[in-house]
Image (cartoon, helix red, strand yellow):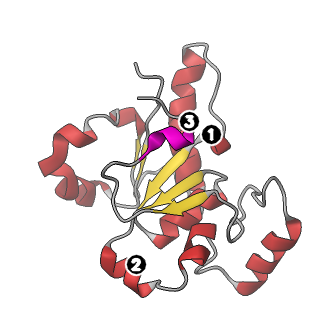
Amino acid sequence: NSGIHLALATSSHAANFKLKTSHQEGLFSCFAPSRRVLGDDPRIPKGKGKPAPDIYFLALETINQDLRAAGEKEIEPEECLVFEDSVPGVEAGRRAGMRVVWCPHPQLLKEYKGREAEVLAGVANSRDEEVVEAMQEGGVRGRLAGRPGLVGDGWAELVETLEGFDVGKYGIGV
């Protein structure tokens, strides 16, 4: 046990997830089946998929259930690191109060050129009044449960590849 707790939170429904990942079973085997939350998971309320934070809260709960059973300390959202490829996923992670690493497809990155900071804050597709409210409310480094982050708050980063990703800067030792 490395002390690193992993869960998977994907908007892909079960059939699509299987199709997308069947050729990479070794990679996905690090996610215990009990810690995989798919887009059609009945525990996610209808209409609460990404960009709502529910899928990330549920993924965290799958970890915390195991920790409670083992008598260990639960993990808080601000202790989580989300890896995302989608804009709604970045927003969901930020709304969950989690740190986010955005690693988009190059074409998606082109579509959001010049708006990267908004994506990282989780406000690229938010309603204007919601963004203004979130920025006025502040909170811990601008993070409030259910609210996007703030532009430039340092709680998200953009990377073009995960090859050579420095987990050490997040306090993760492997």
Which callout, 2 or 3, points at the residue further toward the start of the chain?
A: 2
Amino acid at pointer 3: Gly
Which callout, 2 or 1, points at the residue further toward the start of the chain?
A: 1
Give x and y (percent) for residue 92: 57, 62
Residue to which mark 2 is pinned:
109
Is residue 43 shown above or below 103? above
Stretch in magenta = 166-171
Amino acid at pointer 1: Glu
Image quarter in which the N terminus is found: top left
Q: Element type at marker 2?
A: helix
Give x and y (percent) for residue 95: 65, 60
Is residue 158 shown above or below 69? below
Distance Cα–Cα, label 3 vs label 1: 10 Å
In magenta segment, residue 170: yes
Give x and y (percent) for residue 11: 40, 61
Residue to which mark 1 is pinned:
79
Is residue 166 or residue 102 the one in the foreground?
166
Indicate which label's residue lies in the foreground, 2 or 3.
3
Quarter of the figure with residue 65? top right
Image quarter in which the C terminus is found: top left
Which callout, 3 or 1, points at the residue further toward the start of the chain?
A: 1
Q: Is residue 46 visible?
A: no
Residue to which mark 3 is pinned:
171
Residues at marks 3 and 1 touching, judged by CB atoms closer than 8 Å: no
Q: Element type at marker 1?
A: helix
Residue at 81% across, 72% down: 135
Distance Cα–Cα, label 2 vs label 1: 27 Å
Amino acid at pointer 2: Leu
Categorize mark 2 by other alpha carbons within 10 Å: few (<14), some (14-19), many (20+). some
- Horizontal side, residue 108 vs residue 66: left or right: left
Residue at 26% across, 42% down: 28
